Every structure is written in C-alpha cells, then in structure tokens.
Amino acid sequence: MFTGLIEHLGTVSSIILDSGGCTLTISDSAAILDDCHIGDSIAVNGACLTVTKFDQKDKGGWFEVWLANETLERTDLGERKVGDQLNLERAMGAHIRFGGHFVQGHVDGTAILVSKSADGDSLRLLFQFPEATPTRPSLLPYLIPKGYVTIDGTSLTLTVVNDAEGTFGVMLIQHTQEKITLSKKTVGAKVNIEVDMVGKYVEKSVVAALGGGGAESVRALVEKVVEDVLAKKGLK
C-alpha cells in the first residue's frame, strides 16, 4: 500500500527485453534504498513492483524490477527509455503520517495529456481517456470533482471531470511541479491512472445489492419506482 506522495525521482539506466517482459534498472535511487530488502515493493510511476536486486552505493544507488507483459500492456512503463526519470515511492510504513490517499499501486489504465496551461505559479493539466472497449471499460465513472486520482503514482485532487468529453483535470502547485515528473510531460504523453479504490468497492456493493445486473438493474429499479409513483397518483 502507498500514499501517492512521491519520495524521489529515479533514472532509467537499463532496459532488458525478452518475450515474457523486461528487466528495468533504476539508478540515482540511493535516497530510498537505505532500508531496502530483496522482495520489497516500490511504486514506479504508480505501478507496484518488486525489487529483485539492488545496490545502494554503486552508481548513485540502483535497483532492478521485473515487468511482466501485463504490466507493460497496462502502464506507460513499456514506453520508457534510458535516461527517463520515474516517480518512486516506497511502501507505506505504519509509523508515518498518512498525507495522500490509499494507493494500491495497481494501475487501472492510461490516459493522454491533452493540454497544459499556467495559472499563476500553478499548472493546470487536462487528460483524456482512450475510447472504452468491452474489455477495457471507461474509468470516468470513478472520477468526481474534488475526489482523488493517482497519476503516475502521484495522489492528486481532481479539479474538473467532463463525462461528455471523457476528460478530467488536475492542478499542480509549484512545489509539486518540482518534485514529480508530471509537470515535465508534453501534450500527447501517456500517463498511468489508478482510480480511488473506494469507488470500486461502492460500485460492487451497489451492483450486488441490485442482483448483479449493473446498469440494467439500476434502470429497471428506476422504471419500477416511476411506475409506482404514477400508479399512486392515478396517472397510470
């Protein structure tokens, strides 16, 4: 479990591909390796990955992680190149203040940065989801204005959600711009998205209460309520 508060920016120093996935080496990471152990979890651009090797002293500190094909398909990590910076966060400790929101490090999908605009010292960013498919439904139902979203591992507050256009936006204060990679991304770049898991649990509970029919069950329930009201008023 993570908080979405980025601790450090690491640098991709090696990418080794094979048919089953790839091995990623992330350097300049000594700052987060002082208590590291093989098998620990580190969120890399929001994806929870397992440390398979590390050395805190060599080359500014580095660690290796393995990316399965599922991870490469669901995140932007398959598009990273040597020299790219990545947002890093160690798993949440029980002794720390909880300043973000509950982040699992399980990326739900990606979105595209469609616009950037300055607002004083702050930066407004607007994103758009790809067209939904039967196997990859839209994540927009889980986003609400002033709710949480995790973008490239960073816990952020949604400033706008436009269901009709499939877009959503956030604002980065100057401090945040300096601490994460998101402010450096160009229009057209892909980002990793993890929606607030509370919304997923609420949806599953409601669907289960309605008999598992999802939207059709909700529609049928609304139609029944309307019919009952009309019948009581003698309009049907």
Image: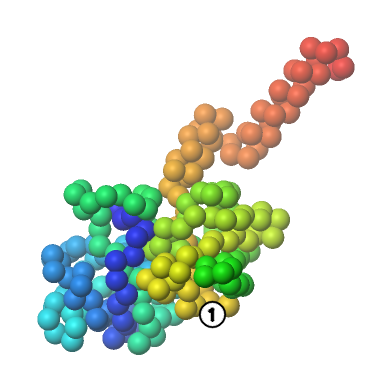
Q: Where is residue 57 in the image (x, y as percent from the top left)?
A: 12, 81
Query: Is 67 placed left or right of 134 in the picture?
Result: left
Q: Residue at x 21, y 69 (%)?
A: 32
Circle 1 sits in a helix, a strand or a loop, which is it?
A: loop
Q: Which of 203 and 216 is in front in this view?
A: 203
- Give the x, y percent position of residue 165: 69, 60
- x and y, in percent, of residue 33 in the image: 17, 70
Of the pair 47 and 83, the residue shown nearer to us? 83
Up the image or down, 106 lies above or below 14; here it is above
Q: Work out which quarter of the rendered image holds the C terminus and state it.
A: top right
Q: Toward which corner of the image does residue 65 lie, by quadrant?
A: bottom left
Q: Where is residue 64 in the image (x, y as percent from the top left)?
A: 23, 76
- Residue 215 visible somewhere in the drawing: yes
Task: Name which residue lies at 63% across and 33% down.
Answer: 217
Q: Name the residue under label 1.
A: 186
Please give the name of the residue rendered at 51% of the width and 73% of the height, measured from the top-left corner: 190
Please name the amino acid that badge 1 sits on: Thr
Against 203, is 191 above or below?
A: below
Residue at 36 percent across and 49 percent down: it is 102
Q: Is residue 24 visible?
A: no
